[in-house]
Structures are given as C-alpha cells and as structure tokens.
Image (cartoon, grey):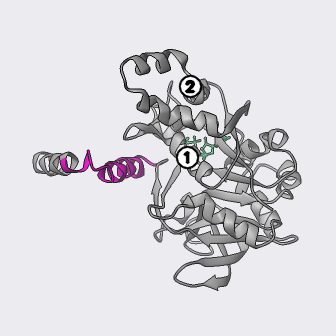
Amino acid sequence: MRVRKAVIPAAGLGTRFLPATKAVPKELLPIVDVPTIQLVVEEALAAGIEEIVLVTGRGKSAIEDHFDVSYELEETLAKRQKRELYEQVAAISRRVRLISVRQKEPLGLGHAVAVAHQAVGDEPVAVLLGDDLIDCEGLPQGGIGQLCSVFERLGGEAGVVALTEVPAGEEHLYGVVAGDVVVDSDEQRLLRLSQLVEKPAPGTAPSQLAILGRYVLPASIWPILERTAPGKGGEIQLTDALRTLAAQGDGCYGLRLRGVRHDAGDRLGYLGANLAYALKRPELRPGLVALMRDLIDRYG
Ligand code: UTP
C-alpha cells in the first residue's frame, strides 16, 4: 500500500533553543537560508507524499504563513526580477496539499501524531520530525522515501522506523531499540524490533541503536495511539505506541538509513547542519572555508 500522507509534528515548545524560540517557532530556524521545516517538507515531496498534516500549537502560525501564497512578495519580487527566490517556496505550496491541525497542549509526540488522525483518516502515515535532518545526497529517495519503500515491500501492515547508532553514554536521550536482524548488507540493514524503550535510564539501554525522527506507520497505529497512556516525563510517547505495535500483527521494523544525519534539535547539531549545508553550496563554500580558518585562528 502506497504512503500518501505525512504528519509533521511542530507543536513542541523548543526549550533547547530559548530565547530564539520564544516568539519564533523552532521549525522556522534556518539552515543557511531555508527554514528547517521546508527541508523536511521537500523530503516528503521527494518520497511521493501528496498531503501533509502539520501539527502546530500556540504561537506557531508563522509556519502556516511560510507555506501560504504571498501575493505581495510575489509581485514585488517579480518586479525586481527575483522571482526565482519566491518560486522555491511557492512551488511547494502548489505541489502538496498542506493542512494544519492544532495540538492544544504539548502532551507529547504520541499525542501530537494522534491529533492528526482525523485529518489523515484510517490509512498509513509517514511521520517526519524537523529535529533530524537527513542529507541523502545522491539518493533521489531521501530519508523518508527509504522507509516508504521498505514499508511497501513488507506489505503495508508493519511499522518501519529509522535507526541510527548513538555514542555509548548518550542512549538516555533517545528512544532505544533492540531486535533481530532480518537483512544485513552493505545496502541495507533491517531489524525486526522486539524492545523499544523511551529514554532508558543510564546503563539500562538494550543497545546503542536509537530511533531518529522518521517513521512510516500502518493504519493499525491509530487505535494504539488512542490507548497509549502517558509515559516518560508524563508525555504520551510515540515509542510506547510503537512497542505495542511491535508486539502485535506484522510488528515493527527498524532500518539504518543511508545518508548523513544532523541532529538539528540540539544546538551543536544545528550549527553543524548549517555548516554542512553551506559547504555543499558552491557559491558559499570558498568564502565559508576561508572564514572558518580565520575564525579558528582568532578564537582558537
Ligand atoms: P522535542 O521534545 O524534541 O521538541 O519533540 P520540543 O519540545 O519542541 O523541543 P525541546 O526539547 O523543548 O527543545 C520532538 C518533535 O515533536 C514535536 C516537536 O515540535 C518536535 O518536532 N512535539 C513534541 C509536538 O508536536 N508536540 C508535543 O507535545 C511534543
């Protein structure tokens, strides 16, 4: 079954980026000059997603404005012959149906996804978090596209989540998994998951494999989400719902993605993502390399 719809939860408080996120949604913080959420929407489009449900909260209306048609901007830029700048985002608005729903209180990621149920309907869904950026240069599918392919190949009834190996000692920051390897090649590594623990206490993690912010979930996730009680931190955790999914029916799989992952939800990861995406742009690269050398000499 083809995955046609995606949910992008963007209703979190973004406390790690205060004070920047007091009035500006974290999802609009730029990677060079493109808001993080636009990169995530482009990734979903590359995977063939046709409809995106944005889950937003209080103070997040600027995200909706970003994807809206802006006639004033369109006209002004057309006059100044800078239309192609505007076209980048206008093209997105034309290619995808974007709707937004409100999560009235930030009760957790699982709750944010559940809020999108009515808008998505009883069908499979891709979930993408702006906290993780996946640079799959050279791979037309992108991060979520790799998961969609595996999801379809498995028959459309099992969940598939993206995995990454995290350094020892950092497991308590993530949803951590363990399971049986079902495919192991240079091209792909797929596990059928048996254990999923949200932010395990230090020393108790079942492995160093953590879930990163890309998921493809079958329609059976919806009733599970409705029933999932608050877990770690008093929040309704998506990882807890995935554990239930893993224990029933066709289960839940984890796929090691090909590509480079940047943890843009963390300050250092965010700075790294900016540098990496700038270094990829030929018009910025030479200047940036010179600037970095100069800054390191100056600040050590
Ligand atoms: P995080 O917990 O990493 O994001 O949630 P946050 O709360 O925005 O940021 P910090 O930790 O306070 O800095 C991961 C993703 O889930 C969304 C967030 O917007 C983020 O994209 N989320 C989280 C919701 O939409 N609703 C929630 O209740 C919780």
Residue 217 location (% of width, % of height): 76, 59
Question: How far apart are the two marked residues, 1 and 2, measured between alpha carbons?
Answer: 18 Å
Residue position marked by numbered label 2 in the rendering: 62
Query: Can residue 19 be seen here?
Result: no
Query: Can residue 128 be seen here?
Result: yes
Other-residue count near label 1 (Cα within 10 Å), few / some / many at <14 / 14–19 / ≥20: some
Is residue 285 found inside the magenta-colored segment of the image?
Answer: yes
Residue 130 location (% of width, % of height): 55, 46
Q: Which residues are magenta?
A: 266-286
Specify which label sits upstream in the sequence, 1 or 2. Answer: 1
Q: Is residue 38 above or below residue 102?
A: below
Q: Amino acid at mark 2?
A: Ala
Q: Quadrant of residue 187?
A: bottom right
Residue 105 vs residue 30, the one in the foreground:
30
Ligand 1 lies under 8 Å from the Cβ of mark 2: no
Q: Secondary structure at mark 1?
A: helix
Q: Residue at x 50, y 14 (%)?
A: 72
Q: Secondary structure at mark 2?
A: helix
Residue 187 vs residue 229, the one in the foreground:
187
Residue 135 location (% of width, % of height): 46, 58
Residues at circles 1 and 2 in contact by the CB criterion of under 8 Å = no
Q: Is residue 58 above or below residue 242?
A: above
Main secondary-structure element of the magenta-colored stretch: helix
Q: Is residue 75 above or below residue 14?
A: above
Q: Amino acid at mark 1?
A: Glu
Q: Residue at x 85, y 45 (%)?
A: 121
Is residue 208 found inside the magenta-colored segment of the image?
Answer: no
Q: Quadrant of ligand 1?
A: top right
Residue position marked by numbered label 1 in the rendering: 42
In the image, taking residue 298 as reference, residue 260 lies left or right, namely: right
Residue 101 vs residue 299, the one in the foreground:
101
In the image, taking residue 128 as reference, residue 266 lies left or right, namely: left
